[in-house]
Amino acid sequence: MACSRIFAGTTRTPPIVALARKLHPLPVAASRLQVRSMADSSAPFKKVQIQRDDDTTFDAYVIGKEDAPGIVVLQEWWGVDFEIKNHAKKISEFDSGYKALIPDLYRGKVGLDVAEAQHLMDGLDWQGAVKDIHASVNWLKENGSKKVGVTGYCMGGALAIASSVLVSGVDAVVAFYGVPSAELADPAKAKAPVQAHFGEDDGFVGFSDIKAGKELEEKLKESGVEHEVHLYPKAGHAFMNSSADGIQRRRTMGESDVENATVELAWSRFRSWMNRFLSTTA
């Protein structure tokens, strides 16, 4: 649900991480190391191995129709867990079908509480994550997808926007509640169409609050790419997480419940955007 602003190359504590530490302090260093390995994904996901240009390999999880347009689905700070797999499965079933692929940015690790998620995110190589996204886009195009989009949530949302700047071959981006730092990527240099979604009650200042969303919109205007930025009243952070477990986890982080109509409206806009830019029938 929660994640950090990407302060690549800085020592400043991201505001959301500071909040997480306040909510869940780490009195014992060992608690930060209690990170569980992700269990092998069961059907209908297929586990594949992808190789980057620098010969680094990583696992990814794919679901959906062969030879359909592809969508790279990027995780929150928790890792490749139940919620990101819920999103990928749902996306694969939209419209005439998509091939959804989740790259495992944490290399098999999942945080089961805030402390673990924080530890994993703190250790992430952000530039390496962008390389993972690039390799994932290439893999989809080499395996039957003529067009490929990128979407992500929180940490993944920020990385999705970064991919519009840094990753060639991306045909469309939809980002949820996350904006990259200028050190990682400047949205004013975006090259792919971007749609972004933010909750008006999101309190993560500078990362996914209203101000961050409006500043992103101004940057996208500078870029000249087609774009949409949507703000949702009475919606906080991670409002797309609507499974029973996702709702409960959001509540433990102090987030209020969100109306189903808000979630469905965001999904409807997602579908229209991806269908518009990834359709191969036009």
Image: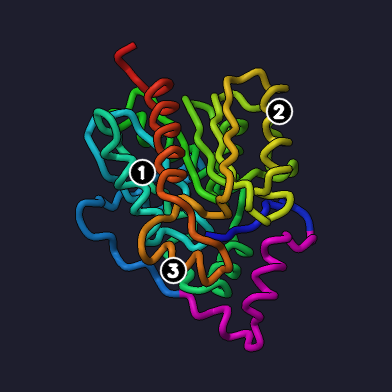
Q: Residue furthest top?
A: 282
Q: Is residue 19 magenta?
A: yes
Q: Quadrant of the C terminus?
A: top left
Of label 1 and label 2, which has the lower sequence position? 1
Q: How is the image coloured?
A: rainbow
Which amino acid type is shown beneath numbered disc 2? Answer: Ala
Total marks in image: 3
Q: Is residue 281 left or right of residue 185?
A: left
The residue where tag 1 is placed is 101
- Find the distance from the CA under tag 2 to the CA under tag 3: 36 Å
Looking at the picture, how far across and down is residue 232, in whole percent? 56, 42
Place residue 144 in its image quadrant: top left
Residue 55: x, y in percent?
A: 46, 46
Residue sitting at 50 percent across and 52 percent down?
239
Label 1 neighbour load within 10 Å: few <14, some 14-19, many 20+: many
Residue 51 placement (x, y as % from top left): 41, 45
The residue where tag 3 is placed is 248
Dot 1 falls on a residue whose secondary structure is strand
Using the image as rendered, state which of residue 252 and residue 93 is in the foreground.
252
Query: Which residue is tagged 2?
Result: 188
Seen at 35% across and 46% down, the residue is 88
Span colored in magenta: 11-35
Q: Amino acid at mark 3?
A: Gln
Q: Are marks 3 and 1 in contact (CB under 8 Å)?
A: no
